[in-house]
Image (cartoon, rainbow, N blue to C red):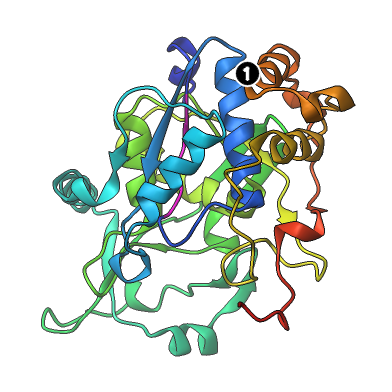
Amino acid sequence: MTDRASALPYRGRFAPSPSGALHFGSLVAAVASFLQARSRGGEWVVRIEDLDPPRALPGAADEILRTLEAFGLFWDGPVIYQSRHQAQYRDVLDQLAHQDALYPCSCTRAEIADSSVRGIDGPVYPGTCRKTSVASRTAHALRVRTDNAEIVIIDLIQGELRWQLQQQIGDFVVRRSDGLYAYQLAVVVDDAAQKITEVVRGADLLHSTPRQIHLQQLLGLPTPRYAHVPVAINGFGEKLSKQTLASALDTNTPVPVLHQALAFLGQQPPLELHSSGLDALWQWAISHWQARIVPRAAAPVPAWAYRHPGDVDN
């Protein structure tokens, strides 16, 4: 694995999708990446991952930025929007095509489910369209060949991880059949363009990592270091998300919520910080941050962080 990232000045990032307001789970990822950067005297940038227009809510990106500011999570440089990088993604697809690393795929989800085995992150694509030609007039996705690539990383929190990409995940999509660029491709292009040296994010994205490293290797891009923090789950064992009724963060009470986020990350903040000012809390958090004591496993969150399915909005 390329380690050119270790020779660069530290740059971390937080990359939310504008599909809804920030909740406690997304705050945990933001806090961890922010502290990892600031404790090393590094930069922390924000990227809005608005690749999928149907999923983006009007005004959500601005609301996310206001929430970050209310919690004292101030970023460096301009905010980056993926929707403005279509030309860069197209150029990278051209590069992969010239390397014969891509092929068109017209398989539907139902067809893949019928002919695949279960992998670590859903059905493993069986390579059907590797062996057949797809008519140019047929709507198709573009998949990248994985072959027998083995991906190995030492995750700062999760430890050593190994993936046999073709057997466990299969050839994966880099451009969807509707013409939209896939998350995996865009993240790799933008991390390289922004000179990100370490990716700190939720463990729900852990199985995206081998896909992204594979693309980095194909494109000759540096591989950042990785640290995947535990997923925040509700009382039903579900990951906090808009779909599982995660509550939007209350920007009027940032300090107690940040105190709970630090505790969730294993940092054991003193109780007196619960009623301190925002500056005092961040000063303590930055000077005492220890990534090595962040727990690996998913953990439940306070009841206020989500709503019960039976709750009715007034």
Q: Nearer the viewer, residue 18 or 209?
A: 18
Q: Is residue 111 shown above or below 42?
A: below
Which portion, as a residue range, is magenta?
12-17
Q: How many marks?
A: 1
The quadrant the C terminus occupies is bottom right
- Residue type at tag 1: Asp
Residue 127 visible in rendering = yes
Task: Describe residue 166's horizontal placement relative to residue 188 as left or right.
Answer: right
Q: Position of residue 56 (x, y in %)?
A: 35, 63
Q: Is residue 221 shown above or below 213?
A: above
Q: Is residue 249 magenta?
A: no
Q: Quadrant of residue 145?
A: bottom left
Q: Secondary structure at mark 1?
A: helix
Rendered residue at 32%/38% (across/down) = 190
Task: Describe residue 297's horizontal placement relative to residue 12 as left or right.
Answer: right
Q: Is residue 201 shown above or below 246?
A: above
Q: Quadrant of residue 194?
A: top left
